[in-house]
Amino acid sequence: MTSRSALRLRLEEIDTESAALRARLEELATARTDVAAQLEQGAYLCLPELPVEIMSQIFLRCAGIIRVASRDLEGNGAFILAQVCSRWRAIALGQPELWAHLDTARFRWLDDEMLKRKLQLCVERAGKTCNMVVSLSWDKKLPGMAPILSPTVGRWTQCEASQVLLRRTLEGSSAPLSSLHTLKIRDECDGTYQDNGRLVLASTETPWLRRVEILYLRGVWQTVLPWNQITELSFGDPREFAGRMDSDGCMDILEQTPNLEKLYLLMDDRPLSQSRHSLRLEKLRDLTLQWRSHCNGAAIRFLEVFDLPRLVAFSTCVHDAPEDAEEWEEEGDAIRDMIVRSKCGPIIRSLTLDIGAGPHIDVVRPVLASTPMLNELKFTGVSAGYRLESLFRLLASKNLPSVHFDELYVEMVHATDRIPFEYIAAVLEGTVADVYGRGTTAREPERRPPRTLRVETPPDVGGYREHRDSAGIKTLERLVTQAQGPQVFITSAHGTPIIGSRRVQVLQNT
């Protein structure tokens, strides 16, 4: 039996050991609290601790345009960044580019004094050397901004304005638009502001001006620009597909652009006058011609006068045409005739056709026949599943004249119940399919299959069916896995096969 003295000694040892463990636990608890605090602090401090160079780039991408007349957060990114903390403020104020993209459009107006003060702050913070991008919109309060903006015009690289407002702003400045390279300009859209003045910009005042976008043109163009130095010209807004364009007014300008290389033209419904016979643009290499369904007559009239011997990239539409088949076919024939007359078919390397929902896919046949050697062929706006199948039937048809294209891109904008894998495979393999779907024949020697194919469809596309699609899938799988096989990308969802470069993956319906 253990003696009482031995038990007391053992009890003292346990108490000593317990005290040491409690001290260790308290030490660990303190350490844990410190580490947790550091982790929490680090989550918030990681961004401010980034180098100034990285923070500056983040600020440029976050701040966006400053909407001078706006109270909303969206148009005041630079001001918000400058109010977060002293370090962010120093970085923001040290970045002139952050304050140099200004839009004066009305949104939620500040009062006059706040408006002028805000604009003055932006101009001061942009400094005296930073290039500026300025958008001027007309309103009763905006003339008060002109005295603030006028001293900066020599640093504008891009400007969007009406003829009237730009002229009045420039009247208060002795400096020319010596840095301007892009001008977006519009005729006044209504008669609210009548102005008998005329804006005249000489080449000595705008030596770097090369790109002009005319957003709205009612008739005779009053502004005088150095058209002979313009290389890129746009009539209409590609983003909004809106804005009235007077055809004869466009032609008057085009006749003054001998060095034009790139042209975007959104057609109005009024055709050119019959006195217009021919327009030869010797240096034009890139043409985009678009029109609405009711403007096809005006578009055809423009195609009849164009002579473009150096055209390399051509984008146009053959969609939303009237139901009358003859009018539909007339569009395709007019495009072909323009290419043949210009003798540019052999040198066109990029062709984009927006084919929409029209009933006759054969409208593209005469266009393709006139462009035999393409690097890139695009079909956009395909709006029905049967048109997707009809398109690939045509491309794989023995009735299609020999056309070479290295890259083929097809964009669906509406859902389809299936993807025609068998015809896609025939196009890639270079075999020839019967136009009525009665199988394929041997490869034609003069046909060269594309090296890259992309088909983009909406998410709700029809699913894979073994009995219907397996043969086409197997052919595609064999082609893409060859040593020098084509690259194929077919994007879809909901169980439709997903095909990627050098591989074929079939996702069964669930």
Image (cartoon, rainbow, N blue to C red):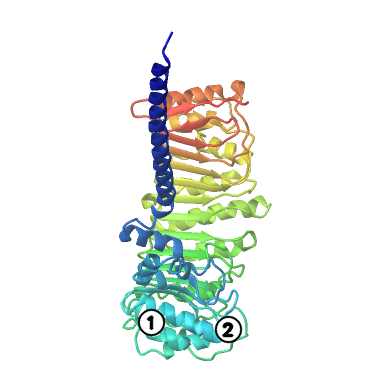
Going 42% across and 41% down the picture, which residue do you hit? 32
The residue indicated by pointer 2 is 111
Distance CA(mark 1)–CA(mark 2): 25 Å
Going 62% across and 67% down the picture, which residue do you hit? 269
Q: Residue furthest front?
A: 4
The residue indicated by pointer 1 is 153
Q: Which numbered marker is on residue 419?
A: none
As drawn, 38 above or below 195: above
As drawn, 363 above or below 174: above
Taking the image as shown, residue 412 lies to the left or right of residue 259, namely right
Q: Check disc 1: other Cα within 10 Å, few if <14, some if 14-19, many if 20+.
A: many
Q: Where residue 492 appears, x then y in whole percent? A: 55, 37
Residue closest to the eye, 367 or 89: 89
Taking the image as shown, residue 314 lies to the left or right of residue 325, namely left
> Reading the chain from its start, which is encountered first: label 1 or label 2?
2
Q: Where residue 36 appears, x then y in whole percent? A: 43, 44
Going 36% across and 83% down the picture, which residue do you hit? 202
Residue closest to the eye, 263 or 448: 263
Quadrant occupied by the N terminus:
top left
Q: Where residue 253 appears, x then y in whole percent? A: 45, 75
Quadrant occupied by the C terminus:
top right
Residue closest to the eye, 418 or 507: 507
Quarter occupied by residue 311: bottom left
Quarter occupied by residue 230: bottom left
Instruction: Say what amino acid the circle numbered 1 marks.
Output: Val
Quarter occupied by residue 362: top right
Q: Are marks 1 and 2 in contact (CB under 8 Å)?
A: no
